[in-house]
Amino acid sequence: MYDVIIIGAGVSGCAAARYLSAYDAKVLVLERAEDVCCGTSKANSAIVHAGFDAVPGSLMAKYNVEGSLMMEALSRELDIPYKRCGSLVVRTESDPREGLEELLERGRKNGVEGLEIIGRERLREMEPNISDDAAEALWAPTGAIICPFELTIALAENAAVNGAEFRFDTEVTGLEPFKTADGDGWLVKTDKGDFEALTVINAAGVYADKFHNMVSEKKLHITPRRGDYYLLDREVGDFVSHTIFQLPDDMGKGVLVSQTVHGNIIVGPTAFNIEDKEGVNTTAEGLAAINQKAGKCVKNIPLNQTITSFAGLRAQEDGKDFVIGEPDDAPGFYDCAGIASPGLSSAPAIGKALAEMIAGKLDLKKNPDFWPIRHGILKPSDLDLEQRTELIKKDSSYGQIICRCESITEGEIIDAITRPLGAKSLDGVKRRTRAGMGRCQAGFCSPKVMEILARELKVPMSEITKSGGGSKLILENLKDGLSEESEGLKAIAKWAADREKAEAAGKEAENA
Amino acid sequence: MLNYDLVIIGGGPAGMAAAVSAKDSGIDSILILERDDKLGGILNQCIHNGFGLHHFKEELTGPEYAQRYIDMVKERGIEYRLDCMVLEISPERLITATNKKDGIFQVQAGAIVLAMGCRERTRGSLNIPGYRPAGIYTAGTAQKLVNIDGLMPGKRIVVLGSGDVGLIMARRMTLEGAEVLAVAEIMPKSGGLQRNIVQCLNDFGIPLLLSTTVVDIQGKERVEGVTLAKVDEKLKPIPGTETHYDCDCLLLSTGLIPENELTRNMGAEIDRKTRGPVVTKEFETTIPGVFAAGNVVSVHGLVDDVSKEALIAGKAAAEYIKARA
């Protein structure tokens, strides 16, 4: 019997697990994918919003502002990159004049600090590539950027070392209330067997309506809203130095242009309401829409330096707000639903709030052994020459570069695979280390990373996947069926031996 | 810190030829830094023939061509370090590199020949819409998997781009038992060598579809199909011309890009068109004493031309060193 079962190992689910692991509670996270951070959490703008955009009084406003305030300290505890670069909402000559004033007013009501409207001149000084048409901007110094993969992975790792259990490749298929000796609980049915818990957190992203509607008569409805993005080469990473938003409209915050914590430029998202909850395909229409809209607030955007494009889904609930907590008719079932933007920014605050709600309900005590500190993957590129030399002396795998574009060493990849909740696939390694994230998009390093994965996980290289499930990278091993006795291999072995002999003879002759 | 008269970045055909040429011009202190575990560069995975017709006046496979130069390097006793990645080069020619055996080390070079080769354009830089499943490979990555590791990345294949690597891989995959459904080329004519079109496609009945591109990739986990469409003279897909292909693999052979991150970070001027460094006819970059040769300067069709160019660069680097001795 678990105290809490969390459905979904996205950023909200992992945040809830991490804050729950600070209590003396038995926590299980169920995830249908092979890793954490495989849904909405992996494909978004990677922004910590300041909190001026959400409607005052909404849960979005509350958790965004709280989350934004928590994020910097959390990034230190979890050893993940975070940069308070500040954000600018740009009003162009063609936008309504009152747009920025409204945002400023909302921001003040939401309690966002340091907001001000700045004029054309200062805007140009801050961002030389701002469009000629830019009239003024709302400056939010508390806006920040973060890596959504590292945040989610770090929250999960920290939860795991503090006792939370994770089961991957496990899909929840049903929820039933049932009586236990300890009181009312939930039977959580999955494709890998049933689990019992006193409480359930529904952090299932675009599927959160499905689980909610299994247990409550007050129905939710989530629309996946697809956003397409471009990621540009670090070569043009200084194109902008703040997060630059357009004036928001009904479909969201428009197409933003921002630096990422790793020095790339991100451009996007679009906003298309779709039916398919798995519809993370980019479309020609979507990519064309970025091309068309991206240039509104900045000029000469170097889209020819695109290294990849991708799409993610925001879980947009009909009520246009987060749905957090127990529905009246399903005690012990906690929603964490409708987590659209600003979901990433809000995740720490939502996770903490859910943990507190459940701790209150179950009267949980503090976990005396809780340790909030997590150490990230050691990056030789952060060290000076002397430290790096010492490191390689201790472990030579840190001397071997595997991903040449991002300068990622074998040591980092081994760490990513062998640490708690380690990587099991090419994408798992990529999200933990950035190997394959650079300009060649894993062209050179993927066979090498596959080799390391196979070696560390003790499976044949042909079983390594891109991202678990059916995403096999190799369809046939040509050496299967070839035995040591095969004529061809014998001939090759003889040829190699002869050659070696000849070389040795040559060397001897030289030495003589 | 180590000191060498000449350090060569890259032990592929360009780097080896430059080293041999510099040695033959009287320079003894030479070091080649190679990132792979053997000399030879990309030739090692090019197991087809057709190399060396100009340079050696005979037809060789890639590994054979590489071996000729590996032998020359060894005969001359030229030093090299393998599995060795150069991290940084200062404009004063101080090189920082790393490998397992030596750790991080620095080398001061009297002169440098850059010979890092090129990389392939990827799906990302092409902006092909669709899902991002397993089964999308650049032709060169597939070539490494099949020829070096003996692993088949797909069984029913569509190739986008008719560059030489793509044509070669269409034949290679067919020979290994895969079915290559089509090679699509967005341009009205192929950029590959005529002999490759004949020997790799025509001889195997693989259709070459000109003015055609991929407009969608299906499959959430593994590639399940692609949609091809005709393009107009502005290379925009023409609605209504879409054809679906059931396949499990998409190979990309849509161009090569010189790898010049080190060059750029050193501050050498880069030619916007070739994406390689601006060089003199002796292959000296805009930084004195820093030369460049082969695909790092501009992408070559034939390795023979790479060797020819690198021999000149190696000699020029030797002259540079001697003039300052």
Image: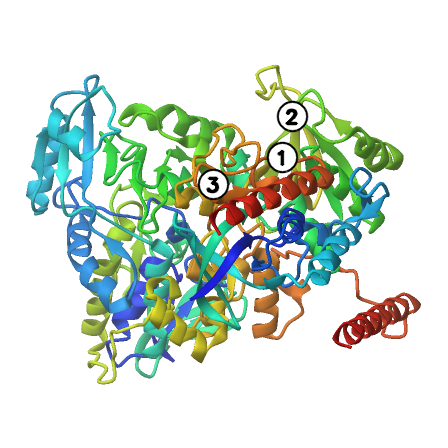
Position of residue A229 relative to residue A458, above or below, is above
The residue closer to the viewer here, A188 or B51, is: B51
Judge depth for marks 1 and 2 and give the one in front: 1
**How far across and down, in percent of the image, does residue A155 sit?**
32, 66
Q: What element carries label 3?
A: strand
Please tell me how crowded label 1 is: few (under 14), some (14-19), or many (20+) other residues with Cα within 10 Å.
many
Residue that protrudes farthest toward the right in the picture:
A487
Which residue is nearer to you in this view: B51 or A355? B51
Badge 2 element: loop
Identify which residue is drawn at 25% across, 80% down: A370
Residue A334 - label = none
Q: What residue type is labelled 1?
A: Thr
Identify residue type, mark 2: Ile
Type of the residue with mark 3: Ile
* Label 3 – label 1 distance at C-alpha: 14 Å
Asked if the residue at tag 3 contacts the one at tag 2, i.e. Cβ–Cβ closer than 8 Å, the answer is no
- Residue at the disc numbered 2: B186
Image mark 3: chain: A
Give the image location of residue A341, x and y in percent: 29, 45
Circles 1 and 2, Cβ within 8 Å, touching? The answer is yes
Crowd around label 3: few <14 · some 14–19 · many ≥20 (10 Å) = many
Q: Mark 3 points at which residue?
A: A307
Q: In this rendering, would A69 be left or right of A249? A: left
Q: In which quarter of the image is the C terminus of chain A?
A: bottom right
- Mark 2 — on which chain does it sit? B
Badges 1 and 2, same chain: yes
Q: Where is residue A202 in the image (x, y as percent from the top left)?
A: 35, 60
Q: Is mark 1 on a helix, strand or loop?
A: loop
User: Is B181 or B61 nearer to us in this picture?
Assistant: B61
